[in-house]
Image (cartoon, rainbow, N blue to C red):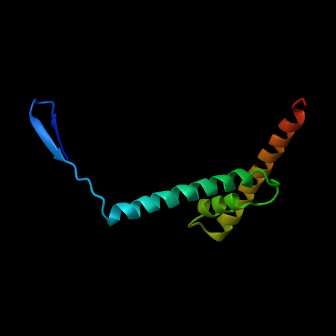
């Protein structure tokens, strides 16, 4: 398909758009479908991860700790993980206090 348009200088330009239905398109379609299914599955995992007891480290927290300490020395890693865990516990206690204060 050829698309003709006019640029700011008043000149006409054309673009050739190729529409293909080859094997690459089928592979890309499969990849997108698998990617969307994976996102839907992980979305449920993340939602349930925070519904569990907040004193336990879940998969999301472990990944965040690992990624946040990537390339750091062991002593710094341990300190950062302890700080992050303390912050998570403080946030959890605050959420539980708000839930307990809500009228039924």
State whether residue 95 is above or below residue 38.
above
Residue drawn at 49 percent across, 58 percent down: 33
Given residues 5 and 1, the one toward you in this image is 1
In terms of depth relative to the viewer, which is nearer, 14 or 29? 29
Q: Which residue lies furthest to the front in this view?
A: 21
Q: Is residue 70 left or right of residue 95?
A: left
Residue at horizontal 80 percent and vertical 47 percent from the top: 92
Seen in the picture, residue 100 relative to 78 is either above or below; the reply is above
Q: In which quarter of the image is the C terminus?
A: top right
Q: Is residue 38 visible from the viewing direction of this image?
A: yes
- In the picture, residue 83 is in which quadrant? bottom right
Where is residue 7 drawn, in percent x and y?
Answer: 15, 33
Q: In this view, does 19 lie to the left or right of 46?
A: left
Residue 101 located left or right of residue 40:
right
> Which picture quadrant has residue 102?
top right
| Residue closest to the eye, 47 or 69 | 47
Q: Locate residue 41 relative to residue 103 in the image: left or right.
A: left
């Amino acid at each position: 398909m050829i698309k003709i348009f006019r640029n700011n200088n008043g000149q006409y330009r054309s673009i050739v758009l190729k529409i293909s239905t080859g094997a690459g398109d089928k592979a890309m379609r499969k990849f997108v479908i698998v990617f969307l299914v994976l996102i839907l599955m992980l979305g449920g995992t993340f939602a349930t991860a925070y519904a569990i007891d907040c004193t336990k480290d879940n998969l999301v927290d472990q990944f965040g700790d690992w990624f946040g300490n990537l390339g750091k020395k062991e002593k710094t890693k341990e300190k950062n993980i302890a700080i992050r865990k303390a912050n998570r516990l403080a946030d959890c206690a605050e959420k539980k206090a708000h839930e307990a204060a809500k009228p039924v």
